[in-house]
């Protein structure tokens, strides 16, 4: 796709791939067209999707791929897809949205950006399959609401162990610093203010 798209919704009619060029954005929802695991998005650079992707775990997209170094992929709505693959040193900004995947693979130098609006409204990723997140990844926190010292946020909720808590957490708060830790029994990653 060599141009920006503005639509109420984009619906996949088959198991097709939508390639989004660097600097191009999609305004509107993206759906699997009423079938589970149908349709793939491949981002070739910096892009923003402002609407939801997929509608539920029963009607999710097949894959989302972002593999160009030094670029930022920004999500403006909740996401349901089978697989998220990130193969380069870049940034994925999930805002305060919930991302639901079967499998997630982040390149070992990827920055995961997320926003915390409140104790219950913050960016998070839920996975039910393989979760590949390394200690060398970075979590960049945008605090955009009331957060108390000692408050915790489950930013990666995994049903399988495989995520390692990143050792580097950056934030925009003058009052708080965040740390990431892994819940050994589950592989969840928790941020603590």
Image (cartoon, rainbow, N blue to C red):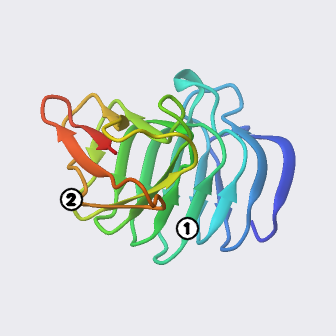
Outermost residue on the top side: it is 58
Residue at x-position 54% and y-position 49%: 94
Name the image quarter holding residue 184.
Answer: top left
Mark 1 is surrounded, within 10 Å at the Cα level, by few (under 14), some (14 to 19) or many (20 or more) other residues, namely: many
Left or right: where 27 falls relative to 122? right
Quadrant location of the N terminus in the rendered image: bottom right
Residue carrying label 1: 72
Is residue 66 visible in the rendered image? The answer is no
- In the rendered structure, which disc, 1 or 2, sits on the residue that comes first in sequence? 1
- x and y, in percent, of residue 37 in the image: 54, 34
Where's residue 133, x and y in %? Answer: 28, 52
Q: Is residue 101 visible?
A: yes
In the image, is residue 51 above or below residue 127?
below
Residue 130, by quadrant, is top left
Question: Does dot 2 land on a helix, a strand or a loop?
Answer: loop
**Label placed on residue 142:** none
> In this figure, which residue is indicated by the disc labeled 2?
135
Q: Find the residue positioned furthest to the right.
A: 7
Q: Position of residue 91 (x, y in %)?
A: 48, 65
Locate residue 5 relative to residue 13 in the image: left or right: right
Q: Secondary structure at mark 1?
A: strand
Residue that appears at 33% across and 63% down = 107
């Amino acid at each position: 796709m060599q141009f920006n798209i503005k639509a109420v919704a984009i619906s996949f009619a088959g198991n097709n791939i939508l390639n989004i060029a660097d600097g191009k954005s999609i305004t509107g929802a993206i759906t699997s067209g009423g079938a589970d695991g149908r349709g793939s998005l491949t981002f070739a650079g910096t892009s923003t999707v402002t609407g939801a992707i997929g509608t539920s775990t029963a009607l999710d997209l097949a894959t989302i791929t972002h593999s160009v170094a030094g670029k930022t992929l920004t999500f403006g709505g909740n996401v349901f897809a089978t697989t998220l693959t990130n193969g380069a040193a870049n940034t994925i900004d999930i805002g305060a949205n919930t991302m639901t995947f079967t499998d997630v693979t982040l390149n070992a130098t990827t920055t995961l950006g997320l926003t915390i609006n409140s104790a219950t409204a913050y960016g998070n990723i839920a996975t039910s399959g393989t979760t590949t997140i390394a200690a060398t990844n970075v979590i960049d926190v945008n605090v955009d609401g009331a957060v108390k010292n000692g408050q915790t946020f489950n930013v990666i909720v995994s049903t399988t162990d495989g995520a390692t808590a990143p050792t580097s957490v950056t934030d925009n708060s003058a009052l708080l610093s965040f740390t990431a830790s892994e819940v050994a029994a589950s592989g969840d990653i928790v941020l603590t203010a």
